[in-house]
Amino acid sequence: MNIEDYTFEEFKALARNFHGYAAPGLLIGGYMVAMAKRNLPEGTLFEAIVETNKCLPDAVQLLTLCSTGNNWMKVTNLGRYALSLGDKYTGAGYRVSIDPIQLENYPEIRDWFFKKKAKKDQDIVRLETEIENAGDKICKIEQVTIKNHFLGHKPMQAIEVCPVCKEAYPVCDGPICRGCQGQAPYSLTTMTAQPDNNIKIVPVDQAVGQQTVHDMTRIEPGHFKGPEFKAGQRISIGDVCRLQQMGRFRVAVHSEAEKRHDGSSKSMRHENEVAEKFAARMAGNGINYELPPHEGKIDFTAEINGLLCVNSKKMKEFNLVPQVMVASRHDGTVIKAGNNFAGTRAIPLFLPDDNFQKAMEVLGDEPLFKILPLRKAKVGILVTGTEVFKGIIKDKFIPVITSKVTAYSCSIVKSVIVPDEKEAMHEAIMEIRSAGADMLITTGGLSVDPDDITRQALLENGLTDVLHGVPLLPGTMSLLGRLPENKEYGSLQVLGVPACALYYKTTFLDVILPRLLAGREVTRLELSSMGEGGYCLSCNRCTWPKCGFAK
């Protein structure tokens, strides 16, 4: 059976020249491409989507104008031997794949396709004969519409020079190229160090009368650690002995290169200048820092009590920039006023200006850190469960919740215990809203038992923005949502707490409560990131939040 205008033998030769050998997958691929093309209206300008990176892309390139180079063919490796050809403007087209049922009529192809024979055991002549006889009879075709984001060319991206390797790359990849981020498929065998022409190293006795270029630290183990000499300090004859006692027999002083007021040159920036400019960009609401930098570093301090919010994505991008750093406590940590929580600095004494500019570009205009104050919520507690309502089981949930929310200066305005009956739950919710609550914390009825109807009752009351189930143990069955404002009542945050909160000291409740009090929007994406670190070890002595749970 021919493949378009080629005889089977001609296409084999074509495949051999292009692919290196006449691979069975490429021969079958020829029939698949031809089948898809026949079904497209004549004159259609089409693009190709290939679902495997083995052999089939070459068949597309042999029989169409589509290639990865011109971006008319896109390989989306789904592990399926299939391809789609679709109108490049509308996406309307056809998908062709191998039909495993039809392979039963061609045992040699079947054994090759399902890897039932080692390559050395395959009968190549018989296999090629079956492929020629089968043609496209082993294929199935479906009408499809290719999704818009797979069609056409992506817009041109801005190109810059990577500050690490000095090669051009698209800036959408980050502050440095993906190769320098660690994705390169090779290791460099040589590295060239760039000399720093802004400083010179001299023996201590030759440094008299010259200015130091950085803070020099004196350490007395267990007693003192701090700068004995400050950047810019002029060394006197009396300082020589002190420096030698500190173990400093050579010191760094300014060279005669063209300098700024702080000793940095036009192409290099001093660590203190860098730290000051970074801090000004990083600090948002509720944050203080002191100047000048201390030993080249600036620490950030909480100005108020509240929730620390860290732009984690921006922090990662910033730390990819060569020779700069910032480190902080975890996003979502509750911070007390006066506590240090982060610090930043340049790594070298003088930072190359291109690295400085790249770091400032990453920081942009939005702060890296901010602290949100925690509101003093008016909390209503709803306990559901017939066994608790009837007194068969003593309620312990209200005391647990009360202790946790009052620790954040919140107040309890209403507590209600109801049986597993929707009508009773509806009435209780109304009572809690009437009491002026702006947060409802409920327990029971959040799992899979037949009597677990609390979630359904909340939904019938208008619960929206619902997130049910989180990747944390304990606390998986937790629920988040909101009852919207109406003519009678204000908006009500809703937090559903599973029964595990009665047994474990720390659950999802402890993690999420301060975020809700800070008014921070909680998304499914944020919850999904809690899975790593979301497994509690149930230590005999709980030290949370000092441990890594949910961080």
Image (spheres, rainbow, N blue to C red):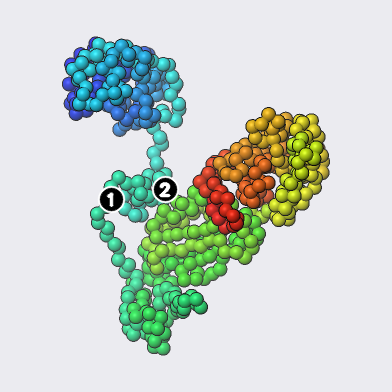
Q: Is residue 390 left or right of residue 366?
A: right
Q: Position of residue 422 (x, y in %)?
A: 76, 30
Q: Secondary structure at mark 1?
A: loop
> Image quadrant for the N terminus?
top left
Q: Is residue 25 visible?
A: no
Q: Nearer the viewer, residue 285 or 198?
A: 285
3D distance between C-alphas at marks 1 and 2: 21 Å
Residue 174: which disc? Answer: 2
Q: Position of residue 500 (x, y in %)?
A: 65, 44
| The quadrant where residue 426 appears | top right
Q: Which mark is residue 49?
A: none
- The local crowd at label 2, few if under 14, some if 14 to 19, many if 20 or more residues have their Cα within 10 Å, is some
Question: Which element is circle 2 on?
Answer: loop
Say which residue appears at 39% left-offset and 57% top-offset.
Answer: 322
* Front-lying residue, 91 or 527: 527
**Residue at left 41%, top 55%?**
321
Position above or below: 208 against 482: below
Marks 1 and 2, the one that precedes in the sequence = 2
Residue 187's tag is 1
The residue drawn where x is 35% and y is 49% is 182
Residue 311: x %, y % from top left: 53, 51
Q: Residues within 10 Å of mark 1 (few under 14, many from 20)?
A: few
State which quadrant residue 145 falls in: top left
99 or 214: which is nearer to us? 99
Please, what is the three-letter code of the amino acid marked with disc 2?
Gly
Query: x, y percentage for residue 150?
Result: 42, 29
